[in-house]
């Protein structure tokens, strides 16, 4: 694992320390890694949403569509 050192003003360091305690992280590094992963996931989701919004509609999202979708998810999730 690579290391990275960052400098924070005292107010931000105190905030990080408080979050580490509140969220039961083992260290400030764990907390920062979680934030980075969440940001990466948000960016991926944003790109997927933008791609979906830019694509043509394939079929109307009517009642039958959602019934079929629910059945598919239940069949493939083991529920």
Image: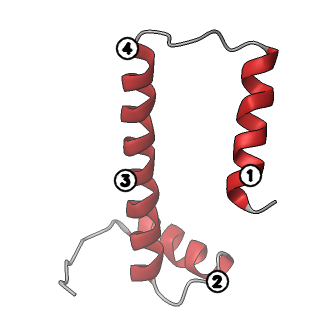
Q: Position of residue 12 (x, y in %)?
A: 43, 64
- Residue under label 1: 75
Secondary structure of the residue carrying tag 1 is: helix
Marks 3 and 4, how far apart at CA: 21 Å
- Residue under label 3: 40
- Residue under label 2: 24
Compared to residue 66, the image places residue 61 above or below, namely above
Marks 4 and 1, how far apart at CA: 30 Å
Secondary structure of the residue carrying tag 2 is: loop
Secondary structure of the residue carrying tag 4 is: helix
First in sequence, mark 3 or 4: give its number. 3
Mark 3 vs mark 4: give the one in front: 4
**Residue at x 71% of width, y 33% of height:** 69
Q: Position of residue 24 (x, y in %)?
A: 64, 83
Q: Position of residue 70 (x, y in %)?
A: 77, 38
Mark 2 vs mark 4: give the one in front: 4
**Residue at x 41% of width, y 34% of height:** 48
- Residue under label 4: 54
Instruction: Using residue 24 as the reference point, say whether residue 27 is left or right of it.
Output: left
Marks 2 and 1, how far apart at CA: 36 Å
First in sequence, mark 3 or 2: give its number. 2
Marks 3 and 1, how far apart at CA: 30 Å
Mark 4 vs mark 1: give the one in front: 1
Q: Quadrant of residue 52?
A: top left
Compared to residue 51, the image places residue 5 above or below, namely below
Q: Residues within 10 Å of mark 1 (few under 14, many from 20)?
A: few
């Amino acid at each position: 694992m690579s290391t990275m050192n960052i400098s924070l003003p005292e107010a931000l360091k105190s905030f990080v320390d408080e979050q580490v305690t509140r969220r039961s992280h083992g260290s400030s590094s764990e907390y920062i890694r979680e934030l980075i992963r969440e940001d990466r996931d948000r960016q991926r989701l944003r790109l997927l949403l933008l791609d979906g919004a830019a694509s043509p509609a394939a079929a109307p999202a009517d009642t039958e569509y959602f019934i079929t979708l629910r059945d598919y998810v239940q069949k493939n999730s083991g529920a």
